Every structure is written in C-alpha cells, then in structure tokens.
C-alpha cells in the first residue's frame, strides 16, 4: 500500500509542477514575446504587500525541496527491503534503490542551490548553468531507470521503468537545448509537458503494479514473497507478457495525447486571459496636431536650418 501512495504522491507533485510551468511559461511568452527568456522557476506574485510576500515569492522552490526530501527518505528506506524479483541477490535491489535515492539527492542539492542563489548573493547561479546541470541529472536518472529495468524479473515493472527512462532522456535533451537557446519557447513548453507526462506515467506505474483491477490478464501479484514487498507482479506466459507490454504501450500513447490536449487547452485559456500581442503589423504613427489627423497623407518634416547652397 505504501508503494501506491508514494506513486500517487510523485504523480501529483510532477503534474502540478509541470502544469504550473506550462501556465507561467505561456503567460510570460504571450505578455512579451520579444523579451521572453526561460526561467528556472516562476515566482508566486500577489498584489498585496505583506510580510509573507517573501515566502510566497519562492513558494515553488520550497515545495519542490519538501517533495524531494520526502522522496529521498522513501527511497532510502525502501533500499533496505528485499525484492525477490530483482536479478541477483538482495544487495542488487539495495544498490539500485540507493542509486535512485542518490539521483533524488542531487536534484535536492540543485534546488537548494537555486534557492540560495535567488535569496542571497553568496552563490550566483545563472539560468544556463541551472539547465545544463538539470540536463546532466535527468540523463543520470535515465541511466538509473534503464539499469533498473534491465535487472527486473517483473515484466510490468521493467516496462514501466524503461518508459520512465525514455521520458527522462527527453527532459535531459530539452534542458540542454534551453541551456544553449534560452529564448526557445517551444523547448520550454515541451519541458513542462514532459514533466506532466512523467507524472502521469508514475501514476500508471502505481496502478499497474499495486492495483489488481489494472493488472493485465495473465499477470498477477506473487503471494509467496517476503512480507512488505509490493509490486511483485509477474506474467506466467510469454503471450501474457507480450499482451501486457502492448497494453502499456497503448496507455503511453493515450497519455501523450492527453498531455498534448492539456498543452493546447492551457495555451488557449492563457491566451484568452492574458491576450495575444501580435507583432509585424502596421501601427498608426502618433501625431502632435489636429491637422495631421485630418490629413492622413500629410507628413510633418523637421525644418532644415543652416544649409548652404
């Protein structure tokens, strides 16, 4: 049960963070397309000036640090449990879980560095360096998830880990693009969409491993495992394994379509609220006299003085 709760917690965190990034990125781009610049985080701004303004300004970073700290504690605790569905003896599961905890700890350090950089002048941390570091951490997460998938004897869990690794690789590529081209709005929006997709897939992983109603036919949870081991789902026949893999592939495509729909709706609603500023059209030349308004063909010229024949 704790595994399902953790996946729901991870899914809600990633979904809210990705959706908030999509909304703020779209709003900033619509307000000023020419001055648009990608940001590592987006401040919570309020009209009222109060003592809590400083706290709410960096609320996104505070919540991110809290969620990463909870995830790190969970992964470290889980690493001491044995998992009979990992190839090799129990220390293999211990080391793979510690790898995941280490990646989360690195993200925690990156978030703390960003907070120190924004609140003080002790540690300057430019946005391009932030996205470059984030790209390296996402790639490390991709490597960890791929390694975990290769060690799994559970067919469903191995498939879920491989898809999660692919999403992490996409996030790594988008971060390095933003580090090199910070004004690329498409890459910034795609990064928020990839975070949302990772959150949805985390939810699907929890449902596929821990909820009987979402486990495909022909696969089941092992009942003769050590107490406390969850997600021990295995397919008996090869056909059942292939069928379960095909179902997960189909679900992934559905989630991608759902994320694209979220992206379109977010842009449409934000554009409706903020408004779209169009550039490139002709604008009226401001005039200083009423006669110029009356005669649109009249162009006022500055008098030339001091000229010589």
Image: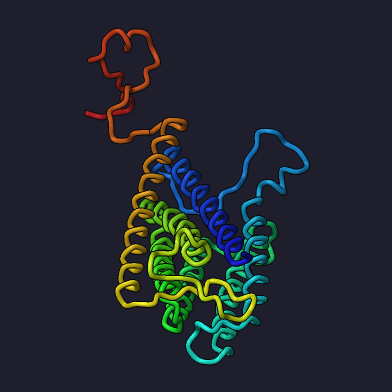
Along the line of sight, which residue is nearer the eye, 52 or 6? 6
Q: How is the image coloured?
A: rainbow
Q: Against 46, is 54 above or below?
A: below
Q: Is residue 107 left or right of residue 246?
A: right
> Compared to 289, does 109 lie above or below?
below
Position of the C terminus, as image quadrant, is top left
Q: Taking the image as drawn, is residue 139 in sight?
A: no
Based on the displayed image, in which of its 4 quarters is residue 285 positioned? Answer: top left
Q: Residue at x 50, y 84 (%)?
A: 86
Given residues 84 and 64, the one toward you in this image is 84
| Relative side of 141 to 110, left or right | left
Is residue 160 visible to us here?
yes
Q: Residue at x 36, y 58 (%)?
A: 251
Q: Position of residue 307 (x, y in %)?
A: 28, 28
Query: Dividing the image into 4 quarters, which one contains the N terminus?
Result: bottom right
Left or right: 48, with 159 as reference point: right
Viewer-proximal residue among 288 and 264:
264
In the rendered image, the residue lying farthest to the bottom is 89
Instruction: Give the side of residue 160 with respect to residue 59, left or right.
Output: left
Along the viewing direction, whichever of 148 and 183 lies nearer the viewer: 148
Residue lying at 61% horizontally and 81% vertically, measured from the top left? 226
Residue 203 in the image, given as x and y percentages of width and height: 50, 59
User: Which image quadrant is residue 190 in?
Assistant: bottom left
Picture coordinates of residue 105, whole percent (x, y) = 62, 73
Q: In the rendered picture of this protein, how many numbered marks are placed on residues? A: 0
| Placement of 143 over or under 196, stated as above or below | below
């Amino acid at each position: 049960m704790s595994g399902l709760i953790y996946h729901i917690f991870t899914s809600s965190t990633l979904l809210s963070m990705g959706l908030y990034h999509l909304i703020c990125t779209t709003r900033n781009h619509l307000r000023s397309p020419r001055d648009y610049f990608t940001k590592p985080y987006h401040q919570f701004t309020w009209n009222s000036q109060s003592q809590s303004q400083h706290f709410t300004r960096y609320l996104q970073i505070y919540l991110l640090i809290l969620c990463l700290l909870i995830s790190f504690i969970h992964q470290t605790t889980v690493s001491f449990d044995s998992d009979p569905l990992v190839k090799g003896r129990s220390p293999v599961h211990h080391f793979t879980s510690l790898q995941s905890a280490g990646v989360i700890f690195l993200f925690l350090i990156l978030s703390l560095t960003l907070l120190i950089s924004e609140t003080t002048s002790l540690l300057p941390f430019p946005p391009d360096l932030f996205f470059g570091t984030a790209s390296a951490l996402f790639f490390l997460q991709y490597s960890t998830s791929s390694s975990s998938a290769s060690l799994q004897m559970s067919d469903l869990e191995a498939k879920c880990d491989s898809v999660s690794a692919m999403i992490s690789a996409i996030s790594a590529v988008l971060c390095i693009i933003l580090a090199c081209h910070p004004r690329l709005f498409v890459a910034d929006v795609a990064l928020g969409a990839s975070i949302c997709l990772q959150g949805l897939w985390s939810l699907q992983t929890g449902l596929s491993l821990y909820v009987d109603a979402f486990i495909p036919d022909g696969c089941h949870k092992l009942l003769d495992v050590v107490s406390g081991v969850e997600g021990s789902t295995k397919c008996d026949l090869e056909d059942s394994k292939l069928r379960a893999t095909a179902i997960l592939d189909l679900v992934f495509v559905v989630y991608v379509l759902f994320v694209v729909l979220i992206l379109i709706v977010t842009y449409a609603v934000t554009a409706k609220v903020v408004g779209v500023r169009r550039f490139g059209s002709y604008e009226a030349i401001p005039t200083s006299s009423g006669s110029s308004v009356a005669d649109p063909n009249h162009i006022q010229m500055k008098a030339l003085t001091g000229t010589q024949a």
